[in-house]
Image (spheres, rainbow, N blue to C red):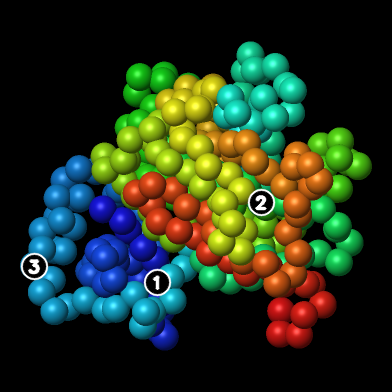
Amino acid sequence: MQFVRYTNGSNAQWGVCQDDTIVPVAGLREEVSYQQLTDSGFLRLVENAVKAAGSNSVAVDETRILTPVPRPGKIVCVGLNYHDHATEQDEDVPERPLLFGKASTSVTNPRDPIVHPADLEQVDYEVELGVVIGRTAKDVSASDARDYVAGYTAINDVSGRDAQFVDEQFYRGKSYDTFAPMGPSLVPDEYLEPDSLDVACRVNGETKQSSNTSEFIFAVDELIEYISGITTLRPGDVISTGTPGGVGIFRDPPELLEPGDTVDVEIEGIGTLRNPVVAESDPGV
Ligand code: MG
């Protein structure tokens, strides 16, 4: 079941996306509780509401899909979490997850532009599975970790490589406004198996990354155990679980994003997150 946050001209609202239509979900408003998505009783109510919706649905084409997590409390990113991405960098498999932060204000909607900053030359794409937290989690064991997950979404962890490499830390290069497209749907944990999903990234229709989350070095439950042992995770926080091989900077020669490009990030069961790339100086941005 794919929850989507959308607008058809008025306030943002929540619905369930089925094929080309969205069934509005009464009671789930802008202030959606991510905790509700961890509650199977609530999910049964939504399932029944969707079945009973009849003609009470809207065509996806008549709406604007918004990111399901417009204001995450924090975005905790994991570097080097796919075996194939470690291989392309000649890096050893890490003993523990490599964590870094990405500003929560970098989130942007599906279809909205990724703004290529004038002061960067190496802007790169990274398809990542996003884990949205649904319940406050501190010192959670891996065996209990999934109980704390609201659901899963797709993230493009857009990365300014020149900033990342010059600074020798990740925050600036990862945090420019619009560098975290997120969406198009949020699929509750009970409907998705996060450690066996096909993931892909295409630039202008050409496949650049293609892998499966079974390549994870650290699975979602292990990441939640590790991160919640360090910092309290709260509802609406996001873990971005790392990217597979095929990123632009490690291609020979490098293939980086330029204004005019279109990037598709696709995750099985979640959908395709599409964003155009525009120059910072483009009018209207
Ligand atoms: Mg990343």
Mark sitting earlier along the chain (3/2): 3
Residue at the top extreme, as displayed: 95
Q: Quadrant of residue 168?
A: top right
Q: Which quadrant is home to the C terminus?
A: bottom right
Direction from residue 189 to residue 200 in the image, left or right: right
Front tag of 1 and 2: 2
User: Can see residue 268?
Assistant: yes
Q: Quadrant of residue 7?
A: bottom left
Residue 245 x, y percent position in the rendering: 63, 36
Q: Label 3 CB, ligand 1: below 8 Å?
A: no
Residue 284 x, y percent position in the rendering: 71, 85
Residue 209 x, y percent position in the rendering: 58, 44
Q: Quadrant of residue 179?
A: bottom right
- In this rendering, the answer to whether 97 lies above or below 271 is above
Residue located beneath label 2 in the image: 125
Say which amino acid is labelled 3.
Ala
- Secondary structure of the residue carrying numbered label 2: loop
User: Which dot marks residue 52?
Assistant: 3
Direction from residue 187 to residue 132 in the image, left or right: right
Assess disc 3: are there few (<14), some (14-19) or many (≥20) residues with their C-alpha within 10 Å of its C-alpha: few
Say which amino acid is labelled 1.
Tyr
Residue located beneath label 1 in the image: 6
Direction from residue 146 to residue 182 in the image, left or right: right
Identify which residue is drawn at 50% across, 60% down: 273
